[in-house]
Amino acid sequence: MGGEQGLEILEKLNPDSCRIVRQKCQNKALLEAVEDREMAEESMDWERCLLIGFITEKVAKKVSEFYMEAHKRRYEHIGKRIDETLKPDETAILFIREGHMVQFPKDIEVFSVAPPVLDEIHRWLRSRPLLRESEDSKEGESTS
């Protein structure tokens, strides 16, 4: 669901993103829906089930499988919609959470943009193994 209806939905879900999209639409951009509502809701339902926790491993495994299947179908659909709607030499903005599983068509160049604080967290996480190695080697030198 694109157009004005899509903007109304986006406004409820994410007002900040909606502001950006609304401005782009005023400058002749088109809002294209890439999500399938039913697939998104199914994926979210299975995710909620996973958050509850389970007593048995059997049930946890089954729910996890259902979640992964729904998740995979959802992101395959998004990739397919992008491929169907984005024409050669066009530019698009996709607002999506980190860790998504969308496989973009090979002829699309993707730039990921994240808030500076998220970049700092990623750098800190990447540097942790290096810091540990450095600390371990210093400990080894001091005990020798």
Image (cartoon, helix red, strand yellow):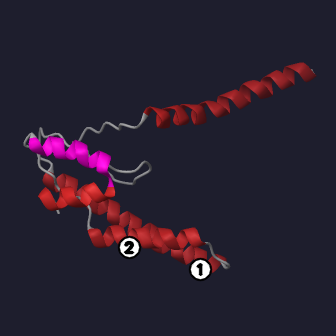
Pick the residue in front: 90 or 26.
26
Residue identifier under label 1: 59
| Region rendered in magenta | 14-26
Q: Position of residue 20 (x, y in %)?
A: 23, 42
The amino acid pointed to by label 2 is: Glu
Question: Which residue corresponds to mark 2?
Answer: 42
Q: Is residue 50 above or below residue 117?
A: below
N-terminal label among 1 and 2:
2
Quadrant placement of the N terminus: bottom left
Callouts 1 and 2 close, C-beta under 8 Å? no
Question: Is 53 situated left or right of 26 in this image?
Answer: right
The residue at the far right in this view is 144
Residue 85, visible in the rendered structure: yes
Q: Name which quarter of the figure residue 34 lies in.
A: bottom left
Q: Is residue 17 magenta?
A: yes
The structure residue drawn at horizontal position 54% and vertical position 70%, both measured from the top left corner, is 50
Dominant secondary structure of the magenta stretch? helix
